[in-house]
Amino acid sequence: MNESADFGQPDGFVTPYRNVDGSMALVTLFGSSIDADPRLRTALRLTSVAFGGAIRRDFHTMPEGRRLTQREAEIVSRIAAGARQSEVADRLHLSERTVEQHLRNARTRLGVTTSAQLCVEALRYGLISM
């Protein structure tokens, strides 16, 4: 992040994400010292995706027909709460492949590419709650 040095901040990173319409967007975070703890970086990246989604929310509303099934919402909710796919499968008495398929379907319905985006968008549109 050479640009961060232009602002007197030596450390930073960029979080890219894909918009529902297929375009790409970036959120840039920088500071004098960003902790290298992978958990903190993951939290910062999720915050970036949420921030990007909040900006988009002002310009877009959820398209009709982009709802989750009850099972998809249940699985996404558990993933958003921090459960692993294998844990969700065990808890719901499903195979891991079935859980993966429900997540793929949910990502397609909401027009996102990652599970992090899926969780953020599902929360943002009120399709799941925490």
Image (cartoon, rainbow, N blue to C red):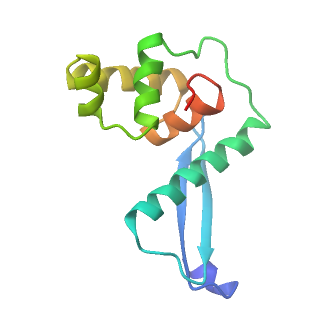
| Residue depicted at 43% across the width and 37% down the height | 115
Q: Quick check: can you spot residue 114?
A: no
Q: Which of the image's four quarters has the N terminus?
A: bottom right
Position of residue 54 relative to residue 125, above or below, is below
Q: Position of residue 110 (x, y in %)?
A: 54, 25
Name the image quarter holding residue 130.
Answer: top right
Position of residue 79 relative to residue 73, above or below, is below
Position of residue 43 relative to residue 29, above or below, is above
Instruction: Please state which of residues 123 and 48 is positioned toward the viewer in this rendering.
Output: 123
Name the image quarter holding residue 88.
Answer: top left
Position of residue 57 relative to residue 106, above or below, is below
| Residue depicted at 51% across the width and 16% down the height | 68
Q: Position of residue 89 (x, y in %)?
A: 25, 24
Horizontal side of residue 77 vs 23, given as left or right = left
| Residue depicted at 27% across the width and 23% down the height | 91
Name the image quarter holding residue 36.
Answer: bottom left
Q: Position of residue 11 (x, y in %)?
A: 54, 80
Horizontal side of residue 61 vs 80, given as left or right = right
Instruction: Please state which of residues 30 and 20 is positioned toward the viewer in this rendering.
Output: 30
